[in-house]
Image (cartoon, helix red, strand yellow):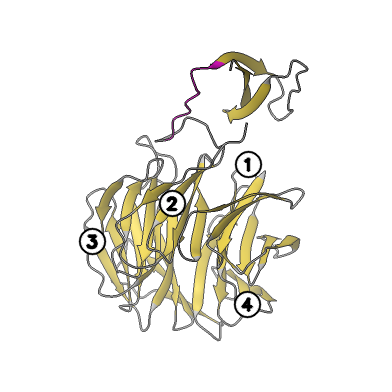
Amino acid sequence: MAMRQTPLTCSGHTRPVVDLAFSGITPYGYFLISACKDGKPMLRQGDTGDWIGTFLGHKGAVWGATLNKEATKAATAAADFSAKVWDAVTGDEVLTLAHKHIVKCVNFTQDSNCLLTGGNDKVLRIYDLSKPEAEPQEISGHTSAIKKALWCNDDQQILSAAEDKTIRLWDRNTGEAVKTLSFEASVSSMEYIPDGEILVITYGRTIAFYKAHTLDPIKTIDAPASIHSASLHPDKDFFVAGGDDFKLYKYDYSTKEEMESYKGHFGPVHCVRFSPDGELYASGSEDGTLRLWQTAVGKTYGLWKCVLPEWFEVKWYAVEKPNVPVHGGDGNQRLQCLQHNKAILYTIQDRQ
């Protein structure tokens, strides 16, 4: 039985959504922050997309946004030559960090004590948030605007991508570049997966995976259209990507085969990320909306409810090996859903 993907649409922004990020899982669930050219980053409940609040204070487009793991702090990067740190619980502005040019990206260390920024002045900056008056550590080397910068290797190294068509791996303590990769096109996005130390990047139509510590290649996949963003599922079974053709693509990570594609946005997809539990992925678009997509279509989760027609007779089977499909000879249709590493098979008998 084919299951139709029905994304949840999150409205509120009035300009293109250019970045998004999830928090870790907290006692109150997990949260989602979005950056938009309307200058008003928004905080939402991660599993439902319900609006919680808007961070007001920037005077230009917001290009980057992030949350710390505990969802107690938020940071934003903007065209008003500033990065801001916010109390994500109260929505209050905590700190404004003045820059010399447009700021494109922000990223907290794991302990939330330091903030990494990058932007059009080609310089990486590390701010000690416990000493807001102190000058930041500056790291130079890129020859064009920095688009993305991330901590890696327990915050001892930094990964940065710039319009100079390079990705660079930096030593935090020395400020020296450990390795540089050059590409045929500017890198459009970068995601760091701590579990397994995997770096996911996109450029042109290519989605590429690298070992984050060494920048050694793992694999590459070419998509049907120019891709702006990609995200690897926490279990590393598959990944999703979106770009110029308004579609979301889902690929098998091992085989590189396309599994599904969905069209829901009315403009190019600028950003996509999996939730920390892997149950959904969020996408942000030129059309000014965020959309939440189910990883396992048809599963009851968040605002999605799995409803079966009355003429279905449902029986339940527990399976010892969750990823092995069960084939029955009784002509019944079978639908596999994964939940907590245990597969539940619905044996559905058509009673029409």
Q: Are marks 1 and 3 in contact (CB under 8 Å)?
A: no
The percent coordinates of residue 216 (x first, y second) are 74, 64
Q: Secondary structure at mark 3?
A: strand
Left or right of 108 in this view: 43: left
Say which amino acid is labelled 1. Asp
Q: CA distance from mark 2 to mark 3?
A: 27 Å
The percent coordinates of residue 190 (x first, y second) are 57, 64
Left or right of 198 in this view: 191: left
Q: Nearer the viewer, residue 125 or 235?
A: 235
Q: Secondary structure at mark 4?
A: strand
Left or right of 109 in this view: 39: left
Q: Which residue is mark 2?
A: 291
Give the magenta range: 304-312
The percent coordinates of residue 227 (x first, y second) are 59, 66
- Dot 4 crowding, Cα within 10 Å, few <14, some 14–19, many 20+: many
Q: CA distance from mark 1 to mark 3?
A: 35 Å
Residue 339 is at least partly visible in this image:
yes
Say which amino acid is labelled 4. Thr
Q: Which of the numbered marks, if any, corresponds to residue 166?
A: 4
Q: Nearer the viewer, mark 2 or mark 4?
A: 2
Q: Which residue is mark 1?
A: 235
